[in-house]
Image: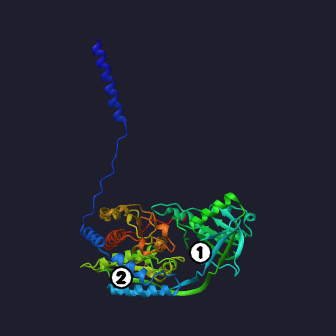
Amino acid sequence: MKHFQKASLVGAIFVALIGCQTVSPIKTTTPKLIINDSDDAQISQQLAKQALSSRLSYDIVESLTVEVGPRLAGTDKDIVAVDWAMEKLWLMGFDKVYKESVQVPAWSRGTAHASIVSPYEQPLVITALGGSIGTPLNGIQAPIVRFESLEELQAASPGRIEGKIVFIDHKTERHISGKGYGESVGGRSRGAIAAAEKGAVAIVIRSIGTDHDRMAHTGMMRYEEGIPKIPAAAMSNPDADLINAMLKRDPNIVLSLNMTSENQGIATSYNVIAEVTGSSKPDEIVLIGAHLDSWDEGTGAIDDGAGVAIVTTAAKLILDLPQKPARTIRVVLFAAEEVGIVGAKAYAEQHADELDKHYIAAESDFGAGPVYKIDFNVNPETFEQVKQEHSAMTLFGVELGNNEASGGPDVSIMPGLGVPVASLHQDGTDYFDYHHTPNDTLDKIAPKKLAQSAAAYAQFAYMMAQSEIDLRPIKPKDPQK
């Protein structure tokens, strides 16, 4: 009898455990991705393999950085770069090569010097921000007032700031997507406006960069009508750390600043364009772009010589196919991106009557790292079809992402005009170590990683040129974003 009771107890426990298992959440697995194996997808894979085994992308960026080098919009070197691009694209055999004029702001960097004069004399490494005015001839000496962010500056009382040099100390966080840049760059672009409104005599920011080199990062800043213009500069990250260490010892830090930068009016530059003419839909356009200009302190290798090389290589590989794609592939090397996407705005105006024929657009402007994900901004009803169509890109390390793409800096204006776009996200983990510094040079580019990006653009551009999917209308732009 005791044996029977023991067996019954064990059985009851067993039944209870089984019961618990039946009410537990059922584990779900993501459906296995079925790779597109169409003829077009197979051709796209061959294009990718060609790009990966070719040195063409590296050879292009080497040529640009060695034969031209820095090419600030509105300078003589900018025109040298335009001539270089026209000749390079013509020699590569594109069906059409032409340029379109763009009026761009001209600015001279001049010299920039700064030092702490009290209580501890120390030189600082700084650079003028793009578009800044210079200081008076004898420079400026004034106490500094520190803020951790643009938002803190905007909330401060004018009494703390009047007659002083504002120091924005916003650190840029490292991230594969570069999202830290978006969080800190407001201090560079709008800091001078906020500081001048409250009576500051100048502004110096911590460089918008993720490095620890004693090297300052330049970049465009803005003025606003009706608000006094004050000199604006960036200091190296180690120098920002130095000032913080000083402030712990003494809150009364006096900085000396002398800059000779000046605005020089308006100059003419050019968008440079090359095309692979479509075989059956030549009036429909797949645009892949980059920007040709660069800041003047490095050689513009990663920003954006790499992008020029990536999209040009992708188009050249498609050009050399035995059969041209259905749609036209248009390579646009935009002018004056660094000083306010000026070339992109001019392109949109000059091509307003054919924007409805732009099937999709994308831009490479995030260095020379590999593409790890592709996002789209297309008709939500056909988004899943578009992803499936591009599924062969996953064979080369590219994840299929979301339907919230911006397309890249120059191309970012396209969705507002109804044009579908894609963002081919590159690994930007170290991009802001070199961005807008003298360290933006060819040695920072790994040829194999650059080739992988060219491979991704080749696949994307070819599949889009062949696609039968209706990409319009795209989702309306959220006015809050």
Front residue of this view, candidates 380 and 465? 465
Name the quadrant of the N terminus: top left
Q: In this orientation, does residue 285 appear?
A: no
Look at label 1 and name its amino acid.
Answer: Leu
- Measured from the top left, where is residue 84 in percent x and y? 41, 86
In the rendered image of this protein, does residue 183 appear above or below residue 3? below
Say which label, 2 or 1, has the lower sequence index: 1
Packing grade of label 1 (10 A; few <14, some 14-19, many >=20) is many
For the view shown, which residue lies furthest in the right direction?
A: 159
Scheme of image coloration: rainbow
Residue 38: quarter of image? bottom left
- Labelled disc at residue 8: none
The amino acid type found where label 2 is placed reads: Glu
SS at circle 2: strand
Q: Residue at x 51, y 88 (%)?
A: 76
Query: Where is residue 72 drawn, in percent x and y?
Result: 51, 81
Q: Which mark is residue 275?
A: 2
Residue drawn at point x = 47 percent, y = 83 percent:
350
**Tag 1 residue:** 129
User: Residue 22's quadrant in the figure?
Assistant: top left
The kind of secondary structure element at disc 1 is loop
- CA distance for labels 2 and 1: 35 Å
The x and y percentages for residue 113 are 63, 75
Q: Position of residue 279 (x, y in %)?
A: 29, 80
Residue that lies at the very extreme toward the top in this rendered image: 1
Q: 123 or 22, which lies in front?
A: 123
In-front residue for pair 453/14: 453
Q: Is residue 141 visible?
A: yes
Left or right? Give the position of 415 relative to 124: left
Query: In the picture, residue 186 is in which quadrant?
Result: bottom right
